């Protein structure tokens, strides 16, 4: 090996390398700035701290030797750092401060003023996230019954499909064919954690299956009916159910939930209504299909100065008009979707109908 930085190294047989690496990490003595290397069937891990060397010798059953290591290139810490010499100073403040990471794809909205530099910005994002292969720009809002939007490739590979990991589940996602929003991840885990043993759950607008599958994984005694209108999203849901091995408890159904539910004569402990722009139009159906004291997680759009209050008022009026009574026991703004327009979640307990 070329001359590099000389320091103490833990030398271990290749087949024990992963186990030892984890222990060194836990003991906080692995030097992150130097690259481990392999020689003659042994892996050499660079150590931070000479004083701790004797301790690990006994504890891990490894030999400690001096070795020369290559330095890892320093990872940039921010877009600003990467682009500080490449963009006019006044534009640095406009760099996107948030973007979505879906598998190895980044979705970003580039402000108008930065459009001439969008390729530079996208390449900088890829430097910041070395595993990312494609940077897409969101073009317009989500539209139509399937809630799809247009995307444009700014940098990287020409593809819209990836594998996304969330809360220990894996999902195949195809952004051109089916809706998926990683910003709902907090809601998905909140809802999944609130499901009790043996619950029957209805996911009325299931998409690629991300609520249903997570619930099935977190609550192994729950059963979920997952309805989806878009055939492409439904296909992805079928694949995701298999990938996450929950075939026995998630029942996927292709179709319009209003039609599908005419054939299902059971009531549910919990109903998920994740179709913010028009869920309110299906509230009659959800109320009919929820058991007394059952719960509806309703996602809808709230507007104005107090979008949560706006959503609450709309829902109470609608529920009363339908001849039902509910207790709204949880209400929160999930995300802003436009100025003075937000996705709101309301959790309703169905009292009677
Ligand atoms: C906001 S997305 C849901 C995303 C999904 N819950 C997730 O967490 O990834 C709404 C989904 O509802 C589907 N949809 C729209 N109208 C429907 C209907 N009447 N019946 C069933 N699904 C419908 C759309 O195709 C879309 O995939």
Image (tube, rainbow, N blue to C red):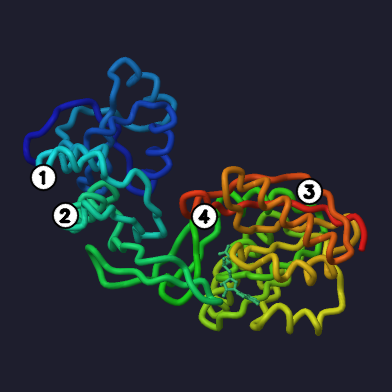
Crowding around mark 4 (Cα neighbors within 10 Å: few <14, some 14 to 19, many 20+) is some
Q: Nearer the viewer, residue 50 or 182?
A: 182
Mark closest to the chain's N terminus, 3 or 1: 1
Mark 1 sits on what residue? 86
**At numbered mark 4, what does the secondary structure look like: helix, strand or loop?**
strand
Residues at marks 2 and 4, CA–CA distance in whole angstroms: 32 Å
**Quadrant holding the C terminus:** bottom right
**At numbered mark 1, what does the secondary structure look like: helix, strand or loop?**
loop
- For ligand 1, the image quadrant comes to bottom right
Mark linked to residue 328: 3
Q: Position of residue 34 (x, y in %)?
A: 22, 35
Image-based side of 198 in relation to 130, left or right: right
Mark linked to residue 230: none
Mark closest to the chain's N terminus, 2 or 1: 1
Residue 56 drawn above or below residue 267:
above
Residues at marks 1 and 4, CA–CA distance in whole angstroms: 35 Å
Image-based side of 267 in relation to 65, left or right: right
Q: Position of residue 134 (x, y in %)?
A: 28, 63
Residue 67 drawn above or below residue 144:
above
Tag 2 near tag 3, CB within 8 Å:
no
Tag 2 near tag 4, CB within 8 Å:
no
Under 8 Å from ligand 1: the CB of mark 1? no
Looking at the image, is mark 2 or mark 4 nearer the viewer?
2
Residues at marks 4 and 3, CA–CA distance in whole angstroms: 28 Å
Mark closest to the chain's N terminus, 4 or 3: 4
Mark linked to residue 117: 2
Looking at the image, is mark 1 or mark 4 nearer the viewer?
1
**Quadrant holding the N terminus:** top left
Residues at marks 3 and 1, CA–CA distance in whole angstroms: 51 Å
**At numbered mark 3, what does the secondary structure look like: helix, strand or loop?**
strand
Q: Position of residue 349 (x, y in %)?
A: 83, 53
């Amino acid at each position: 090996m070329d001359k590099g930085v000389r320091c103490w190294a833990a030398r271990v047989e290749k087949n024990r390398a992963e186990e030892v690496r984890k222990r060194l990490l836990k003991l906080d003595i692995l030097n992150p700035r130097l690259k481990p290397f392999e020689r003659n069937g042994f892996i050499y891990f660079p150590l931070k701290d000479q004083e701790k060397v004797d301790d690990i010798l006994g504890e891990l059953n490894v030999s400690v030797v001096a070795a020369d290591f290559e330095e890892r290139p320093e990872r940039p810490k921010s877009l600003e750092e990467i682009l500080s010499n490449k963009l006019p100073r006044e534009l640095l403040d406009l760099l996107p401060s948030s973007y979505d990471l879906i598998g190895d794809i980044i979705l970003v909205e580039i402000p108008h003023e930065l459009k001439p530099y969008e390729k530079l910005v996208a390449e900088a994002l890829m430097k910041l996230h070395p595993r990312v292969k494609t940077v897409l720009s969101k073009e317009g809002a989500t539209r139509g019954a399937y809630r799809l939007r247009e995307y444009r490739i700014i940098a990287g590979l020409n593809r819209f499909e990836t594998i996304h990991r969330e809360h220990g589940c894996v999902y195949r996602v195809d952004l051109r064919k089916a809706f998926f929003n990683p910003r709902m991840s907090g809601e998905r885990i909140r809802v999944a954690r609130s499901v009790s043993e043996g619950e029957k759950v209805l996911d009325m607008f299931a998409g690629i299956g991300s609520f249903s599958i997570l619930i099935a994984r977190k609550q192994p005694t729950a059963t979920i009916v997952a309805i989806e209108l878009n055939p492409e999203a439904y296909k992805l849901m079928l694949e995701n159910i298999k990938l996450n091995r929950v075939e026995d408890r998630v029942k996927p159904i292709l179709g319009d939930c209003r039609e599908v539910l005419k054939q299902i004569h059971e009531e549910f402990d919990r109903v998920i209504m994740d179709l913010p722009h028009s869920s309110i139009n299906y509230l009659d159906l959800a109320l009919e299909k929820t058991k007394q004291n059952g719960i509806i997680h309703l996602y809808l759009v709230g507007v104005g100065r107090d979008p949560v209050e706006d959503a609450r008022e709309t829902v109470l009026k609608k529920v009363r008009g339908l001849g039902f009574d509910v207790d709204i026991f949880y209400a929160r703004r999930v995300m802003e979707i436009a100025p003075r327009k937000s996705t709101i979640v309301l959790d309703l307990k169905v009292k009677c109908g």
